[in-house]
Amino acid sequence: MPASPRAREEAIQTGLLIDVTPTALQLGITFPVTITRPLWEVGIVTNQPLPEEDQTTRLRDILMAFRLRLASLTTISPLLDFPVLLTLPPNRVPQPVPLFALIQPDPTHQANVTLLLPNEVFLSITSLN
């Protein structure tokens, strides 16, 4: 994941990250939040056609699960895991899906957060070193 605000902005511009800050702000998350393209494709838009309302609900579910995980912590680490219940087509029953949040310092805000899939965690940590 991008380590600097400039690199983060470039990743948003190229589509590697999706900026979901406006929706996060509606849920009381007061810092910038992005979602990786793979998480967006698997968790939000899926490989099945979904109405935009369903996509918005899925995004809000993910962000609320992250917010609830944050609220449960007394100490926050740079990498958090949190479970989300998502219906992944073709299944109709929600399944627990483990997700991660990479929290990085941001000179403009307290922090910025990138939400990602478990298989993206290793790549994120490697790119920061």
Image (cartoon, rainbow, N blue to C red):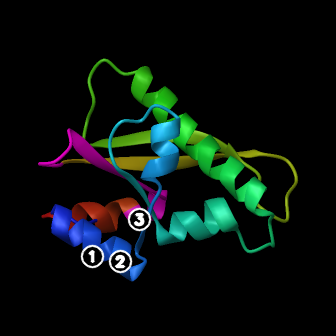
100 is higher (above) or lower (below) than 4: above
Residue 124 is inside the magenta segment? no
Q: Are there few (<14), some (14-19), or many (20+) residues within 10 Å of tag 2? A: few
The residue under the point 43% across, 41% down is: 81
Q: Confirm whether residue 98 shows in the render.
A: yes
Comes first in the chain, label 2 or label 3 = 2
Q: Are there few (<14), some (14-19), or many (20+) residues within 10 Å of tag 1? A: some
The residue under the point 47% across, 55% down is: 20
Q: In the image, residue 60 lies at what x, y percent?
A: 61, 44
Q: Amino acid at mark 3?
A: Glu
* Residue of label 3: 120
Q: Mark 1 and mark 2: span between their CA atoms?
A: 5 Å
The residue under the point 31% across, 68% down is: 123
Residue closest to the eye, 21 or 129: 21
Local secondary structure at mark 3 = helix
Q: Amino acid at mark 1?
A: Glu
Q: In the image, residue 86 lies at what x, y percent?
A: 71, 49
* Residue of label 1: 10
Q: In the image, residue 117 lies at what x, y percent?
A: 49, 59
Magenta region: 106-120
Q: Quadrant of the C terminus?
A: bottom left
Q: Along the horizontal axis of the image, is 97 left or right of 78?
A: right
Local secondary structure at mark 1 = helix
* Residue of label 2: 13
Q: Amino acid at mark 2?
A: Gln
Q: Marks 2 and 1: in contact by CB < 8 Å?
A: yes
